Amino acid sequence: MKITKLEPIILHAPVTRGGIADSTHKLSHWGAPGVAIHTDTGHIGYGFSGTHAHLPTDRLIVDCIIHTYGPLLIGEDPGEVIALWEKLHKQAEIYWVGRAGITHLALGAIDIALWDLKAKAAGEPLWKLLGGSAKKKVEAYNTDGGWLNWPLKTVVSDCKRLVEKDGYRAVKLKVGGPNPLEDLRRVEAVRKALGPDIRIMTDANGRWTLPQAIQTGRRLKDFDIVWIEEPIYFDDVEGHRRLAEAIETPIALGEQLYTASAFRDFIHAGAVHYVQPDVVRLAGITEFWQVADLARCYSLPVVPHVGDMCQVHQHLCFAHPACALLEYIPWLRDWMEAPVKIKDGYYVAPEAPGAGMTPSRKALATINKA
Ligand code: 0YR
Ligand code: MG
């Protein structure tokens, strides 16, 4: 098989109820800028990054895919995924300007598309190709009931619905709002509504200073929280290490980390407990696997962040022994040929060949061709 053409794709999908916010981000659409990699056998591989649907930056990502990496891929055998990843990753002219950021996001989308091609050519879903087992259970926790811009009443009734009607046993609440007492009131209300057996995660999206995180983190303990996610600034290794020493509730982070070496620094420092790599921010599945192996060596659970809206990560969680729990956010559901399936709070292993990001016909018909 040989790569013949790269085609740019930008999808913008509306988020729940027209707009969501956490402590740091506000968005009306989820962005999936990416690529269709065409081959001489007719197989097409799809891979996307994940953004806040900001068209000018989405264009940078697809331009980087098509014009910067594209010429290095034409004529290559897409089955050589790791060798191609090494080739693209080691381009000195490219990493001179970006060992993280746009170039890394572009490489991630390409890597996903290459794995997609490999799995499609093998006629297998990616998790099978990676050695996975459908016997494994991958639990879903739901993030879509806890947005910060929704009034407390809505958060409580949404979380109750997710648990009582949809069967989730774990939900995530956004914190890090302007008033920490209000954060605590929201968590307390949801804990009361759900009872002691449902797990609750909290996510501050990098908002607090270290003393704020210590203070609120200590108080959150009363509500038996699974983790506090991104309590302070994304890149602050030493701050998270100090926080981990100061509070009892475990720390989760990783959605903003671009590289395996950034994860190494947090893990080695003891600054993270729940490791949250994302294929769309790391350079794809290849680098995700490096992070998951590393976490496993330190006995740390891997609970990916889903910039791909879980389409690829479900495969990785079925396949990798460090993963047993996966976030769920529904925003690409209506745009994918085979949206993820969740039954009674658990992912159902996908059977279609590929890595899971093939857009639906409707999506391909309405895309912005960039
Ligand atoms: C905005 N999940 C997250 C929203 C989510 C964000 O990017 O999607 O809150 O990615 O932190 O854990
Ligand atoms: Mg988060």
Image (tube, rainbow, N blue to C red):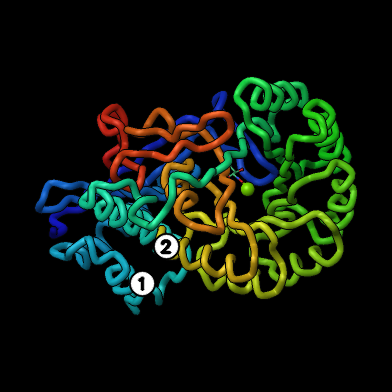
Q: Does the residue tagged 1 have its C-beta within 8 Å of any atom of ligand 1?
A: no
Residue 131's place in the image compared with 192, above or below, is: below
Name, please, the residue furthest toward the left.
40
The quadrant of the rendering that contains the C terminus is top left
Residue 192's place in the image compared with 101, above or below, is: above
Q: Which residue is under mark 1?
A: 89
Secondary structure state at the residue bearing disc 2: loop
Name, please, the residue furthest toward the bottom.
92
Res 199 → quadrant: top right
Residue 313's place in the image compared with 76, above or below, is: above
- Identify which residue is drawn at 79% across, 58% down: 209
Q: Which residue is under mark 2?
A: 283
* Relative horizontal placement of residue 124, taking residue 157 as reference (left or right): left
User: Where does residue 292 sit, x and y in percent of width and height?
Assistant: 53, 63
User: Dots 2 and 1: beta carbons under 8 Å?
Assistant: yes
Q: Amino acid at mark 2?
A: Ala
Please tell me which residue lies in front, 270 or 198.
198
Earlier-in-chain disc, 2 versus 1 = 1
Please tell me which residue lies in front, 131 or 312.
131
User: Where does residue 238 sit, x and y in percent of width and height?
Assistant: 74, 72
Q: Amino acid at mark 1?
A: His
User: Where does residue 285 sit, x and y in percent of width and height?
Assistant: 41, 58
User: Where does residue 343 sit, x and y in percent of width and height?
Assistant: 52, 29
Secondary structure state at the residue bearing disc 1: helix
